[in-house]
Image (cartoon, rainbow, N blue to C red):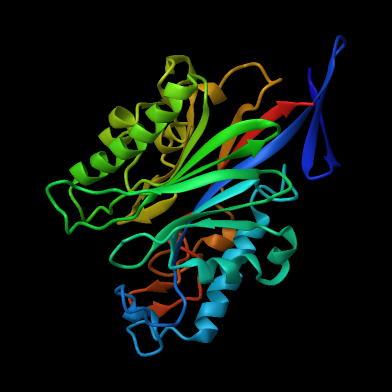
Amino acid sequence: MMKRIISLFFFTILFVGLSAQQKKSYAVYGMAFYNVENLFDTEDSEDTNDVEFTPEGGYHWNEMKYQNKLGNIAEVLDQLGGKYCPAGPAIIGLSEVENRRVLEDLVQHGDFARKNYQIVHEESPDWRGIDVALIYNPELFTLESYKAVPFTLPDRPDYASRDQLLVTGTMAGETVHVIVNHWPSRRAKSIRREQAAAVTRGIVDSLLSLDAQAKIMVMGDLNDDPTNNSVKKVLKAKRKKSDVDAGDMYNPFWDFYAQGIGTLAYKGSWNLFDQIILSHGLIGSDKSELSYWKSEIFNKEFLINQEGQFKGYPKRTHSKGIYLNGYSDHLPVISYLLKEL
């Protein structure tokens, strides 16, 4: 039987497999995503509909509440991946952030600041003013380039939604591409999420046209479950590794969903909108290259309501207008990559 020994090595964890014939070590890299649910500052921005997140607005959003929110989110991010990656995930995708200022306040907050995360962000045209972003540990990920890819509709020039953020960099000496998403909400028709998925799929196909085994991660709040057409058919995300052909993608979160495990709850049932989906180039068995190991939903007890009407649901910031000083209505997700040393 294989034994697993865990030891700290610079900014990674080493797994040492022991058998009669071999001894191998692997570096572990965490790749996380978190919908932080309305991380707004307290100022009224003229070009977005954010008045409810001001002291005069419906949430009476003041400096105390803003600082509490920063502290709560920083607490979660500081714990992500800690079992295998004490330095934290190499990258963390985020959604529902208002602007660069809130990101700067977040990465510089309290104990989380010691990890020195850097920011990738572009303003989106979303009418509420919420964007996607990515933060990364420069000791583990070297940023090469990024760009915001707009989601537009030819027949609706007035339509505004979140851009999709494509980030390219180097990890463990290899090029990786990350696409951070927040697809249209469930208030919109399903065709809107399928159209957003088509934008994502177009980015993936462009990368694969340059390298058929490109290492690509699609992460985000997709506002659809793994079994919905946007994910399953448009994005071509399969449940089983064995079904993933070149050009397809692998969705490790499908199995969680099939077991009734999710990242947000609504009317007594769980959805799994928050996913990290991987290209064929990341699911090979050759661990001398960066490759997928496993995924988790970060569903720690402190993130869950322990009493009341919404017992068992993620503990959010507000519920029915009441300030709860919670975290988010979503749970974070994380996937781990391995590379033999």
User: 150 or 117: which is nearer to us?
Assistant: 150
Q: Nearer the viewer, residue 312 or 157?
A: 157
The answer to whether 332 appears left or right of 193 in the picture is right
Q: Say if 162 sits above or below 52 in the image.
A: above
The residue at the point 20 percent across, 56 percent down is 159
In front here: 211 or 260? 211
Above or below, comparing residue 175 to residue 33 in the picture:
above
> As displayed, is residue 246 above or below residue 74?
above
Q: Residue at x 65, y 71 (%)?
A: 109
Write the residue at 58% across / 68% down.
104
Left of 234 or right of it: where is 39?
right
User: Residue 324, relative to residue 327: is it above or below?
Assistant: below
Q: Is any part of residue 226 visible from this angle?
A: no
Residue at left 35%, top 26%?
A: 236
Q: Quadrant of residue 70?
A: bottom right
The x and y percentages for residue 301 are 58, 58
In which quadrant of the rendered image does the N terminus lie? top right
Residue at the limit of the structure toward the right, as seen here:
20
Residue 178 is situated, as x and y percent measured from the top left of the image, at 51, 40
The image quarter in which residue 84 lies: top right
Q: Position of residue 185 (x, y in %)?
A: 28, 54
Relative horizontal placement of residue 191, taking residue 33 as reference (left or right)? left
Report the side of 27 relative to 69 (left or right): right
Which quarter shows the C terminus? Answer: top right
Task: State whether residue 271 appears in this view.
Answer: yes
